[in-house]
Image (cartoon, helix red, strand yellow):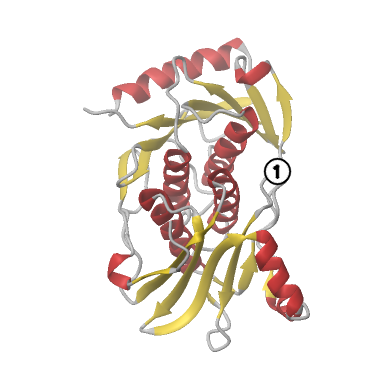
Amino acid sequence: MNSRSNRLIKVLLISLHVLSASSVPLIMSDALIIQPSLLNTTTNVTIPPPSPADPRMTIRASYRLDVLLDPKSVLAIVTNEMAKLAIMDYNGRLGSFQSTPWAGYSDTKIQFKVSAAAQRVETRIAVWSLYYLAANMGILNRYCHVQFRILWDNVQVATLRISPARSSQATIERRGGQQRNNIEDLPFLQDPGASFGGSNGVNGTSLTYGELIVGCLYNEDAVDLSVTEVLGAVMAGLRNVAPMSKTDRMDGIFKTNTEGIDSEVCFAGNGVTPDEPRYQYQFVVSTLRTMPQWLLGEGRLAEIHCGLIIYGRYVGISLLNKLRPD
């Protein structure tokens, strides 16, 4: 990024700161499924108020506390699949799908299986389910094998499972691979090209997605974040923008976080004129996906800010911060 972009980032940063063990599976009843709120602060941004899932939807969860998952693998896989869902038609319909492996974190796998009776379900059901899965794992600190039975009007329509990839793969192979024929591919997300400005992100790293460049830096005096704090904030952001048209312009400011997790993501557009490149919600999705990817690559989870450049023009900024007492 050039010096002008760096100056703009500093100005927007100032503006944003002014704004405010058991071996027996544990079965949790519907009443114990945490459905945390999304807490939003917006300025000149048209985002619908956060709302819980449709009351017709209920979840029955089974936790295998004896089958542990690597929290960083959960962070990588869950945010990557949520980003795919977030760019789809929120009110469209999808069938069964499974996560794609991520180099270095392929020991964990997600499977979303639609029941034979339902055949397809609305995308928003998968969005809600994956968000609640991440929120519950983080808030309860249960990074383990989890299966959600998803019911609509008391009829099971799908299951969502996160588990060790090896056991999931073995199950499919034992069944002769028949399940593969019914599994859809979610939208392909481009893996970014990276150009490094310094070791450990000291001088930043630019991640390129076609016309979009996301330049990431650790905040000055950055506070370390837990996996749960990164997961909760990023998933809140993706859950928040999933209903939006991905080509709509985002020129205001919004902040969001998951209730019960002390972290937040913030986004601000640069107020560009209509004939200049637009800061669209699809770029918000790309940036939210970039945050955990960049942090895991750097080997340190901590507060960061990211400048967004489209067709060579600086259009906005995003931040991942730890919440601090007022």
Which residue was labeled with disc 1?
A: 104
Query: 178 or 251, which lies in front?
Result: 178
Q: x and y percent of residue 144 in the render?
A: 50, 57
Taking the image as shown, residue 44 lies to the left or right of residue 72, namely left
Q: Which quadrant: the C terminus?
A: top left
Q: In the image as oriented, which residue stretches furthest toward the bottom?
A: 117
Q: Residue at x 47, y 20 (%)?
A: 219
Query: 26 or 172, which lies in front?
Result: 26
Mark 1 surroundings within 10 Å by alpha-carbon count, few (fewer than 14), some (14 through 19), many (20 or more): few
Q: Is residue 272 visible?
A: no
Q: Residue at x 36, y 49 (%)?
A: 139
Q: x and y percent of residue 83 in the render?
A: 57, 51
Q: Amino acid at mark 1?
A: Gly
Say what secondary structure mark 1 lies in: loop
Query: 242 or 171, which lies in front?
Result: 171
Q: In the image as oriented, which residue stretches furthest toward the left?
A: 326
Q: Residue at x 47, y 44 (%)?
A: 231
Taking the image as shown, residue 199 lies to the left or right of residue 20, namely right
Q: Is residue 144 visible?
A: yes
Q: x and y percent of residue 60 in the render?
A: 39, 73
In the picture shown, does residue 108 fall above or below 11?
below
Q: In the image as oriented, which residue stretches furthest toward the top?
A: 3
Q: x and y percent of residue 253 in the render?
A: 38, 35
**Can you tell which quarter of the image residue 45 is in?**
top left
**Can you tell which quarter of the image residue 56 is in?**
bottom left
Q: Which quadrant: the N terminus?
A: top right
Taking the image as shown, residue 239 lies to the left or right of residue 284, namely left
